[in-house]
Image: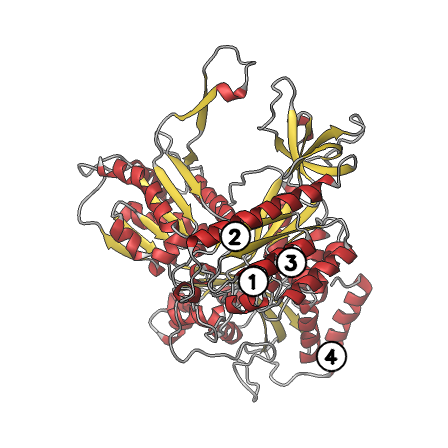
Amino acid sequence: MMLSSRLRQAVYSLQLLLLLLCPIHGFHSSSTITNSRSSSRMILFQSTTTTTTPVPKYPTNRGETVDSRDIVASQRPPLLAIRLLHILFATETMASQSMYDLRLSSDFSDLASQVSMCTLTRDEGGSIGWVNVAEIEAHQDNNNTKAATVNDHLNDILPMETRKQVLRMNTKPGDVVMVESSRGFHLVQVADVMVDVRKMAQTKRRRRSLQGDGEVSMLQQLWNKGRQQQDDNDTTTTKATTDLTYVMETMGCQMNQADSERMEGQLQSLGIVPLLEEEENDDDDTTKSKKKKKKKRKKEPNVVILNTCSIRDHAEQKVYSHLGPHAKRKRNGEDVTIVVAGCVAQQEGQQLLQKFPEIDLVMGPQYANRLSDLLEDVVIGGNQVLATDVTHIMEDVTKPRRTSTTCAWVNVIYGCNDRCTYCIVPTTRGVEQSRPVESIVEEVKELIQDGYKEVTLLGQNIDAYGRDMVPKRKFSDLIRTIGSLDGLKRLRFVTSHPRYMSMGVIDAVAETPTACHAFHIPFQSGSNAILQEMGRGHDRDKYLQIVNRIRDTIPEASITADVIVGFPGETEEDFQDTLDLMNTVVFDSVNTAAYSPRPHTPAASYADQVEAPVKKERLARINALNLKHASERRARLLGTTVEVLVEERNMKSRNADEESVMGRTTQGYLVYCPGDIDELRGSLIDVKITNCETYHLSGVRVDDDDDVEEDS
């Protein structure tokens, strides 16, 4: 919520007047708070839950805590620093009102610049900066005077006792707390945390070298050179004598794709480059079909990262088969570092290292943006490293290596608090942790500056965004905030949950011009009995209410979904309910899957498992209906003109003599049309649809000379 300059001045003047006329108890020049009510006081919106017994690493049973603050606190992570912002007020009433305003998705920094009484930080959006947590322990140890004074430069902004009070609170990034000091009442936001991830990881010294003859690996040479540059204050990019290369193999969902981009950003910050595939022509005539070109790798990578997915059966076996060739290279003495990341890494943990001693690093998805820190123990210490402990999500320290120059993923919430009886995600990705609004806005603004036109907000349960924050936020407000940023052309989001999706989200999409008219809402089953056994927290009627609201509000919107067939206990009648729901909605596309039991999930132990032939037969029937509906939904666009955001060259073009581009409509439909990608990439163009296939459209541009959008 933005305040007008006149209102801002009025608030600021009123605060000064109150300070002059009504001194507040406890205000004095000393940094020590003498307020009789409490010397370590948090007045509003503090989480009051405490942890009396250790909680599981990632709870999987209903009724167990899902508060990431308690779960992380129980593990006692080695916290190094927290980054703080603040807004200073004259009275508790004013601070309380502004806390309420923040629930309406006000930007903390904007609010600080408008109303904060702190002249030292107001022009910087209230930024205090990084606060070293060693200050607390140092004051308990009188011998460590250096650490005790490490934050003294902040005393005039946030007095020492108040600072220590904030550091002792059980908070997470994004939380805002209210504290009182000798200066007044502060709203303090925890913007980010810094954890020593190397201390959180378990290391195991290898009994013998797998690199061969005790030679120093190329990766270690790179690290040593980087250390030398650091000692010499050399800020140039560290490079090895010979380029070190990596290969990233990504399995699974969009979250994994986004994590891979973050890990690649880490690797490239170290000077390690992707191993590119080169084309080899079978014929000197380059005008012949591209199908006659082979792809081969010119050499083997020095670093191999498998970013794994565990949502389907046999996921572990798939990982093992991918590991085989790389492990063999290592056994043969080749210089290769092997990393297993993602959900299978979190799920299997130590067992992966036992089955494949050639693996150097096993890391859960919560460490995707700290790969370089964990690799240091591998390279310098020659250790096997296991990093699967819980931690607060930290903001990126390097830029992700985006796979597109037009469209980008942006994580807004990690993990999931639901305990659907078939799903392993809460076990592998942990409980929900929403990112601060300000961090999301900053990332999207940087993307826009870099020329990106479309952003997709990511979350396993995106409608739950903000419910874990203090104060709570709404996803519908986030849509409006991000969608209103200048320069952004399109905004998408996935994945919605019927249990939490509010009608306000649909209204926000309808009212935000940049928001794409596309909703992905898994229903998983059309049977209320099966939905209850799944623990979905919604029924068939609730799902149809959401669909009807979308159809009434945005008639042309697309609706896609996920469904599981053959869940334990599913009868033919239950399956018919699912087919009936699909016929009622007529989805634009449905991701279908036969149920597969996953480790650590209740449904895996249910006695009434559906036999494989039945699941296979039902999957075939539901796939046929899915194809029919997908074709019908796209066929309605034949002869119409649609707006398409051009993303890439059409690599599937059958006409070698005509250049073709690929893009998507607001509904997410894939569209092919003739055009020069160098001219059109990132442009919004009008395309008249001349052909409709099951999962794509094709057509011709309308008004070729006039419709190319010029980049500003």
Percent coordinates x, y for residue 217 in the rendering: 27, 37
Residues at marks 4 and 1, CA–CA distance in whole angstroms: 67 Å
Percent coordinates x, y for residue 176 in the rendering: 59, 69
**What residue is pinned by disc 4?**
18
Neighbourhood count class around disc 2 (C-alpha, 10 Å): few under 14, some 14–19, many 20 upward: many
Neighbourhood count class around disc 1 (C-alpha, 10 Å): few under 14, some 14–19, many 20 upward: many
Q: Which tag, 3 or 1, sits closer to the chain's start? A: 1
**What residue is pinned by disc 3?**
581
Question: At x 52% / y 83%, what residue is drawn?
Answer: 39
Neighbourhood count class around disc 3 (C-alpha, 10 Å): few under 14, some 14–19, many 20 upward: some
Q: Which tag, 2 or 3, sits closer to the chain's start? A: 3
Identify the amino acid type marked 3: Leu
In the drawing, what numbered circle is on residue 574? 1
Residues at marks 4 and 3, CA–CA distance in whole angstroms: 62 Å
Identify the amino acid type marked 2: Arg
Q: Which tag, 4 or 3, sits closer to the chain's start? A: 4
Residues at marks 4 and 2, CA–CA distance in whole angstroms: 71 Å
Identify the amino acid type marked 1: Asp
Identify the amino acid type marked 4: Leu
Q: Which tag, 4 or 2, sits closer to the chain's start? A: 4
Q: Secondary structure at mark 3?
A: helix
Q: Secondary structure at mark 1?
A: helix
In the picture as drawn, the residue positioned furthest to the front comes out as 572
Between 179 and 21, the one nearer to me in the picture? 179
Q: Which tag, 2 or 1, sits closer to the chain's start? A: 1
Q: Are marks 2 and 3 in contact (CB under 8 Å)?
A: no
Between 231 and 411, the one nearer to me in the picture? 411
Question: At x 72% / y 30%, what residue is drawn?
Answer: 699
